[in-house]
Image: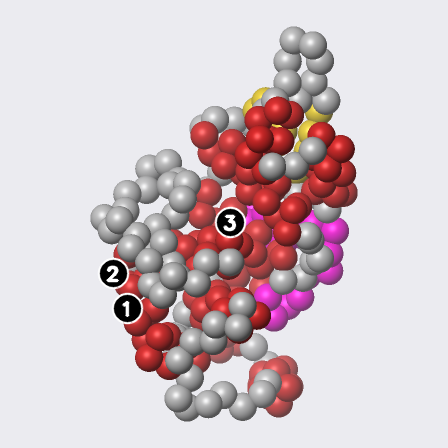
Amino acid sequence: MQYISQINAFWNWRRLNEISHAQVDLYFTILNCGNSCGWKTEFNIPNSTIIGMCQISASELAKHRNALIQKGLIRYRKGNKKNAGSYSITPLYDSNLDINLDINPDINLDINPDINHENIPRVKTKSKTKNKPPISPLDVFAKVEDEQLRGALCDFEKMRKTMKKPMTERAKELLLAKLRDMTENKDEQIAILNQSIMNNWQGVFALKDKPRGVNYEDDGDFLGR
């Protein structure tokens, strides 16, 4: 399983589905354990480990785990006296988000880099453009060409607004510069932004759980925290 691809696909999935913060925390805890186990098809995690990492009760664990199962994000087999319960993670990036939802064609355009946008009928393009609010020419994030990265930046900006810590245009420029200093890889930049959104961080940091085989040259100094 590709760790960063799975993380980015999850955030695209979340835009179309309701999920609580506690369920997101549990999902990323399981995802982290899967990464630590070398992405085995199934891996065992004791309930006590998850309870300690997520700071939840046994009943809350059962409730949130069942919600993740119902949403199709994970599979679970109950353990016994000798073995802890086993988990497996549904690869979202392989299924094009086809998990208990109707795929939005607009989302597919953002996710699939192989789609030739020039072949999209002009009528549909006009319809999309007509429904979009006007973009300020001073908006720094609007000038980012990569659609997925631009979406992650806008989500980060919305998170800052909900925290009553809005960003100035200068702060946006510094954020983009910091991301480029940390890594030139667009997927890694998106994962860094999503990590900050999930944790309600005001700045950006190097990924907390490095995917295996990926090297980062920057120590992940933060911006504006």
Q: Is residue 83 above or below residue 6?
A: above
Q: Give how far across and how far down residue 174 sits, in percent.
A: 30, 71
Give the extent of the magenta segment: 89-107
Helix, strand or loop at label 2? It is helix
Three-letter amino acid code of the residue under disc 2: Asp
Residue bearing mark 1: 177
Q: Is 5 covered by the magenta stretch? A: no
Q: Is residue 79 above or below residue 153?
A: above
Helix, strand or loop at label 3? It is helix
Three-letter amino acid code of the residue under disc 1: Ala
Three-letter amino acid code of the residue under disc 3: Ile
Label 1 – label 3 distance at C-alpha = 23 Å
Q: Which-is-in-front pick, marks 3 and 2? A: 2
Q: Going by the image, does 102 lie left or right of 30?
A: right
- Mark nearer the N terminus (1 vs 3): 3
Here the colouring is: secondary structure
Q: Give how far across and how far down residue 211 sits, in percent.
A: 39, 40
- Mark nearer the N terminus (3 vs 2): 3
Picture residue at 64% right of the left edge, 51% below the top: 21
* Contact (Cβ within 8 Å) of mark 1 with mark 2: yes
Picture residue at 47% right of the left edge, 49% below the top: 5
Residue bearing mark 3: 7
Label 1 – label 2 distance at C-alpha = 6 Å
Q: Give how far across and how far down residue 17 sits, in percent.
A: 69, 58
Label 3 – label 2 distance at C-alpha = 21 Å
Check residue 44 in the rendering and tell me which mark sits there, or answer none. Answer: none
Magenta stretch, main secondary structure class: loop
Q: Going by the image, does 167 lie left or right of 62?
A: left
Picture residue at 37% right of the left edge, 75% below the top: 172
